[in-house]
Image: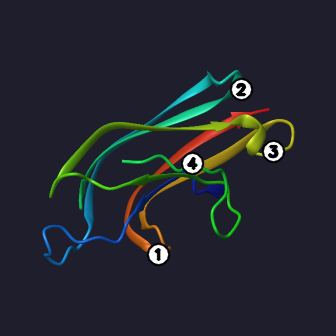
Amino acid sequence: MRILSLCSFLFLSASISNKAFTPRASFDRLWTDFDVFDIGIKGMKVHVKFTACETSDNSTYRSRTWRLAVNKLITPAYDQADYNDMSFFIPYSEFNLSSGRTDLKIDANLIYKEGGRIQHLKYYDFWINK
């Protein structure tokens, strides 16, 4: 099974009201929609429900280690911010898979903008048939 880092949430290092800030999160659930279109491109959408304690968009399809990844830069506006359905789109063409069924795994994490994990949220197994 190949593990793809599809959902990494980027946190800005920040402080709130001049107080030291330690980011953390609690995971609720992760789900997927297959065969959806975004700007005319067919792919899959990953949804995540979580609460972050610390929003502009910054999406790419590769991590710093060149693994398949989707990132979104967030700066929670409150000491505790709930994200009930943050979604990430990735075109199927980015998967670069051979024909047939491929078992995959989403590794959902909160990470710092500069790199390094804040907290692991969930592994999610799925498959794609190309």
Viewer-closest of 87 and 78: 78
Q: CA distance from mark 3 to mark 1?
A: 28 Å
Q: CA distance from mark 4 to mark 3?
A: 21 Å
Q: Position of residue 80 (x, y in %)?
A: 16, 54
Residue 59's label in the rendered image is 4
Badge 1 amino acid? Gly
Q: Is residue 112 left or right of residue 61?
A: left
Q: Is residue 17 left or right of residue 2?
A: left
The secondary structure type at the circle numbered 2 is: strand
Residue topped by disc 1: 116
Residue topped by disc 3: 97
Q: CA distance from mark 2 to mark 1?
A: 31 Å
Q: Residue at x 63, y 62 (%)?
A: 63
The secondary structure type at the circle numbered 3 is: loop
Badge 2 amino acid? Ile
| Placement of 45 over or under 13, stated as above or below | above
**Badge 3 density bin: few <14, some 14–19, many ≥20, Cα 10 Å:** few
Q: Residue at x 24, y 62 (%)?
A: 54
| Placement of 74 over or under 36, stated as above or below | below
Q: Position of residue 101 (x, y in %)?
A: 76, 37
Labels 1 and 4: the sequence-earlier one = 4
Q: Position of residue 15 (x, y in %)?
A: 22, 72
Residue topped by disc 2: 41
Labels 4 and 3: the sequence-earlier one = 4
Q: CA distance from mark 4 to mark 2?
A: 15 Å
**Badge 4 density bin: few <14, some 14–19, many ≥20, Cα 10 Å:** some
